[in-house]
Amino acid sequence: MKKSINIDYWYENTLFDKVELWMMLPKEGMNQSVKPKQVHRVPTEESLGYFILHKNDKIHLNFDVDWYNPKSYEVYLNNEEEKYYLRNTILSPINAEITALAMEITKGKNTKKDQARDIFEYIVNNFKYKYPPRSRGALSFLKAKEGDCGEFSFLFSSLCRSIGIPTRTIFGGWSNGKMNGHAWNEIFLEDIGWFSVDTSMANIQKNNRFSFLISNIRTMHWKKYFGQTEGQRIIFSKDAEIKLSPSYINCVEKSIIIKPLYINNTPFYWGQESLNGCAPYLQPAYVKFDGIFDPSSATIKTFNLIGNWKTKENGIRGILSSIKAMLIMPSLIVMVISLFWDILLLELIYKLGLISGFLCFILRKERTVVFSILLFLMILSILSTISQLSACSL
């Protein structure tokens, strides 16, 4: 049986004599153009592939996966695994300030689930979504009070881990589109297993409910993001700061063309250094450039740093998504044109297109209440147009 989502990933070394690349490999069903030089099992129970790409070499991976479903994961952690998901890291540190804040937020709550819920609501209510952030990491997010999905997730991991709740930051993306990355969390609860928590989507849905109005992403009431997702996600890696193997040796000289990103307000050069031998995150890949880049020959683009990927839903959902994409924008353009030319046939065309597009939203279960209302109103409108056309033909 064909799986729900197709993932197509490629990375081409167009600039350097050599690029080393690390990424998590799918469990099965992968078509690939280049074999990894090494595969290493990591504590998250994933397989970390290591590739070497010389100038003009290209990796191309194509595979199908099912939608993200944390309930299918294990429901037991041994002592070593529990220790790993309680560890202190650079992006999600555990210190006196973090621990005191977590204890204050969860005061009076005795179960890990209730404590995690209080932390979830605290972050949703007290921070602002902003992309891109000035600096990455929980500490800078705590001070700036604004950041993107990564920062929301890093802080949630810090606070939960500081009071003994095993937590990981998940890096993945959405099931339709190009380069559409996202980060969220999972906490481990006894007798339940891994439990999904998405503070950034909850924050967006609470403060800007219609930001995903015409997207291919389902949305929910913000409180449901504690324990649920909309079911349209893929996973690239199951935590941040995963140790790279073979060891990542930082570049002595930093290329001046690569602008640093900031982690906890300290400059960090992506592709030229690691966080104590770890990739900050694998979404889906981390690289190391060999040599100093010549800025006169080309410029560094995002795909030089992480590669390219696109995702597509298979089956009827993918078909509905394609139909929706073909109908909505052209119909809106025809609608605007009809405002300047009073032609009933144009009205009929765009209204039919919008009715079909709204129906696709409903069948895909995306904002069903909103699009059901719009569908009803558009049906009434097209009936009026048909009535006018009939009158004109008599």
Image (cartoon, helix red, strand yellow):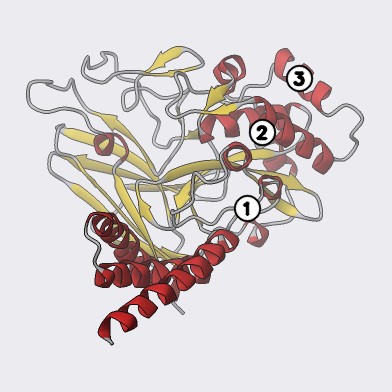
Residue 364 seen: no
Amino acid at the residue labelled 1? Met
For residue 384, which quarter of the picture?
A: bottom left
Counting from the top left corner in percent of width and height, residue 7 is at 37, 59
Element class at badge 1: loop
* Residue under pointer 1: 220
Residue nearest the viewer, comparing 145 with 246:
145
* Residue under pointer 3: 101
Mark 2 or mark 3: which comes first in sequence? 3
Q: Is residue 380 above or below residue 171?
A: below
Counting from the top left corner in percent of width and height, residue 94 is at 68, 21
Q: CA distance from mark 1 to mark 2?
A: 14 Å
Element class at badge 2: helix
Label 3 crowd bin: few (<14), some (14–19), many (20+), radius 10 Å:
some
* Residue under pointer 2: 124
Q: Residue at x 42, y 41 (%)?
A: 283
